[in-house]
Amino acid sequence: NTNFVCGTGPKLKMTLETTEGTADRARNREIELAFTRWSKCVDLGGTTRLSYETAVGQGENFIVATRNPLILGKTGIPYDLTTLEGSMVDGLPVDGFDRHGAGGIEYDQYMNPVRYPIRDAHPQDTTMFSTANSVRRIPADFVFHMYKKERPGQLRGISQVLPALPLFALHRRMQLATVGVI
């Protein structure tokens, strides 16, 4: 259950020390309160729960930090968080060839992500004014890519329910055969 894993969301506990080696409790408390205000304003707990659920079902999840003047005015922190499913992060590679098999994510020579191709609209959006083919390349510093790495070199997530899919087909065949007998 997502609530058991994520709870109400992340909490910040500061333990910063001054140059003299003593804790500045007032400053630490001020930072904790600022984080709490910001996390409530951006619904960090809800974002965390949605992110976890999406990662379990689809195998991966992306959270993009975006500048939001409204959030800045309320909290003093300029960033809001947007949760995206894996199909929103899938662009054509720059040179037409996806060397890493990672949906157009650009990596440096050490396999660190550099930029993520984020679609402006969901690929299944069928509205007349859909911009599903429009892709922005967001610097990796603003993107959190969450997935469970299960093998060396894995760059994208795999759904945790994927191995069970063939069982559903067998269950359906059994159900139809049972219904046919009665």
Image (cartoon, helix red, strand yellow):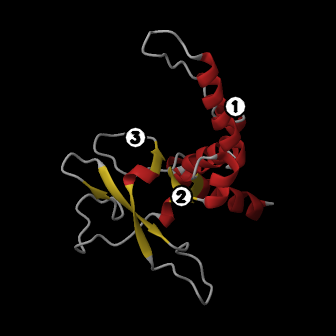
User: Looking at the picture, which amino acid does disc 2 mark?
Assistant: Thr
Q: Are marks 1 and 3 in contact (CB under 8 Å)?
A: no
What is the crowding at mark 1: few (fewer than 14 residues within 10 Å), some, or many (at least 20)? few
Q: Is residue 116 above or below residue 150?
A: below
Q: Could you say which disc has been placed on residue 36 in the image?
A: none
Give how far apart the Cα atoms at labels 2 and 3 are.
26 Å
Residue at mark 2: 66
Can you tell which quarter of the image residue 180 is in?
Answer: bottom right
Q: Which amino acid type is marked by label 1?
A: Phe
Q: Position of residue 35 (x, y in %)?
A: 63, 36
* Mark in the foreground, 2 or 3: 2
Question: Picture coordinates of residue 71 (x, y %)?
Answer: 65, 54
Residue 117 seen anywhere in this rendered image of the structure: yes
Q: Can residue 1 be seen in this view?
A: no
Going from the N terminus, do you reach mark 1 or mark 3 first?
Answer: 1
* Secondary-structure class at tag 1: helix
Return the disc, 2 or 3, that comes first in the chain's sequence.
2
Above or below, 102 against 122 in this view is above
Measured as percent of width and height from the top left, residue 26 is found at 64, 20
- Residue 149's tag is 3
**For the residues marked 2 and 1, what is the alpha-carbon distance in whole angstroms?**
28 Å
The residue at 55%/48% (across/down) is 55
Name the image quarter holding the C terminus. Answer: bottom right
Which residue is at the far left? Answer: 109
- Badge 2 vs badge 3, beta-carbon distance below 8 Å: no
Crowding near the residue tagged with mark 2, few <14, some 14–19, many ≥20 C-alpha atoms within 10 Å: few
- Callout 2: SS: strand
- Say left or right for 180 vs 110: right
Considering depth in this image, is 134 or 90 the residue closer to the camera?
134
The label shown at residue 4 is 1
Front residue of 166 and 92: 92
